[in-house]
Amino acid sequence: MRYLPLTPDDRASMLAKTGARDIDALFRDVPKSAVVARSAFDLPDTQGELAVERTLSCMASRNMAGGSVPFFCGAGAYKHHVPAAVDHLIQRSEFLTSYTPYQPEIAQGTLQYLFEFQTQVALLTGMEVANASLYDGSTATAEAVLMAQRLTRRPKAILSGGLHPHYAETVETLAALSGGVVRAPTAPGKAEDIASLIDRQTACVVVQSPDAFGLIRDLKPIAEAAHAKGALLIAVVTEVVSLGLIEPPGHQGADIVAAEGQSIGVGLNFGGPYVGLFATREKFIRQMPGRLSGETVDANGKRGFVLTLSTREQHIRREKATSNICTNSGLCCLAFTIHLSLLGEEGFVRLARANHGRACALADRLSRMKDVELVTPSFFNEFTLRLPKPAASVVDALADRHILAGVPAARLWPGDRDVRDLLIVAATETVSDEDCDVFVKALAEVL
């Protein structure tokens, strides 16, 4: 039975108040390309529960599960091993408190792991303060741009051509109304001259490292160029495991770090939920979005935890809020904290070395193939190949052989003909020697 709390008269009255002609008029801002007619879905109106389970199971059986086939996809979401202990511990009753920790006396478990999470993120990024998580990496990047615009009172944000396109589109959606967004040209495997774009109207420069093609960027000269013009450097990290080997952005001069934490403790999950990481300099703390969990003592001198800063719109007036996104991915944040705690510093570095070694070995084998060129001269666990034919057709052919061979760059930059033959390949610790052998042999045959 459908739940319809409003009568037709109720709807008519509400539409009259808003001045809208009909229900569809309320959704006029949705692009026509995003609207799909109901008739486009070949699904029955009603089915019993058992029939629904059978239908969905049949549909799901057509998927190639990442754990059952050689898997080399990355491009912002990475397959890593998550210990079984993580899933067990996140279900402990000590952490299962009500939604938001408004009352610290009954949410000490939640507040403590948020505090530990912030400490871990600050150490990983080389920054002085970190917040208690954001929604995901892309929205964290957009929040960073908004923060930079507030701090500098300048309108323009410059985005590196190597920034993941989904991140760039999110920035344009959220930050364009408060200022201009300029994208530098895409230069696969190269560091573009982004410093020449910085002027006195620039609030921030956004650079990803490793970038969307896997290239490791030297942030120091970009930070110097930005600071010379009074702008801030925002460093973006989509593969947080890379920070086990690469110099942290904070040590390279970054003012704000926005990152995706999915690689630690969180599975691929068909695209979410993920967890945003956000860190900055202490002098910018008042403009940092999200929540900040702090340590204190109670009236009896006993250690405790509280929300030190809460500047999201659910806490204060919207016009004074530093963030209008009211989700902080708390469960994923807990999983991140537990997984990183289990690894420890030595284990985290060892994990990073395993990733880098696996990717280097695979890149060497693939780039020795005829007419295959390695585009990225330096990388962590993800690299880009130039193939002698369109990468999308190669990926499809390998998928027919039950190999998920990576992400065609044309899928991320669909209008750019210069990237049609580029294939972005990721190799994490979950890739075996046998997987690599199968991939190399199959790619040679397909090419």
Image (tube, rainbow, N blue to C red):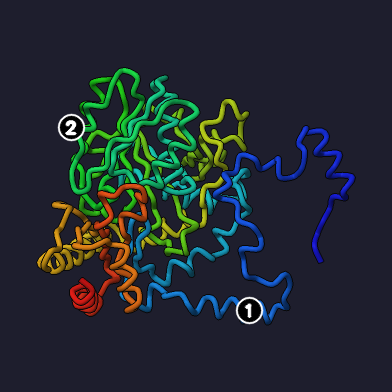
- The structure residue drawn at horizontal position 34% and vertical position 50%, both measured from the top left corner, is 238
Residue 447: which quarter of the image? Answer: bottom left
Q: 238 or 362, which is in the foreground?
A: 362
Tell me the amino acid under the disc marked 1: Glu
Q: Is residue 331 visible?
A: yes
Q: Is residue 243 visible?
A: no
Horizontal side, residue 163 vs residue 350: left or right: right
- Count neighbours of disc 1 (C-alpha within 10 A) and say few if under 14, some if 14 to 19, many if 20 or more: few
Horizontal side, residue 339 vs residue 135: left or right: left
| Residue 157: percent from left, percent from top | 37, 29
Tell me the amino acid under the disc marked 2: Pro
| Residue 427: percent from left, percent from top | 25, 65
Name the residue carrying label 2: 221
**Secondary element at tag 1:** helix
Name the residue carrying label 1: 53
| Residue 269: percent from left, percent from top | 47, 64
| Residue 287: percent from left, percent from top | 45, 29
Horizontal side, residue 29 vs residue 188: left or right: right
| Vertical arrangement, residue 178 with respect to residue 370, above or below | above
Which quarter of the rendered picture does the N terminus lie within?
bottom right
| Vertical arrangement, residue 202 with respect to residue 310, above or below | above
Q: How many marks?
A: 2
Label 2 vs label 1: CA separation?
56 Å
Q: 163 or 301, which is in the foreground?
A: 163
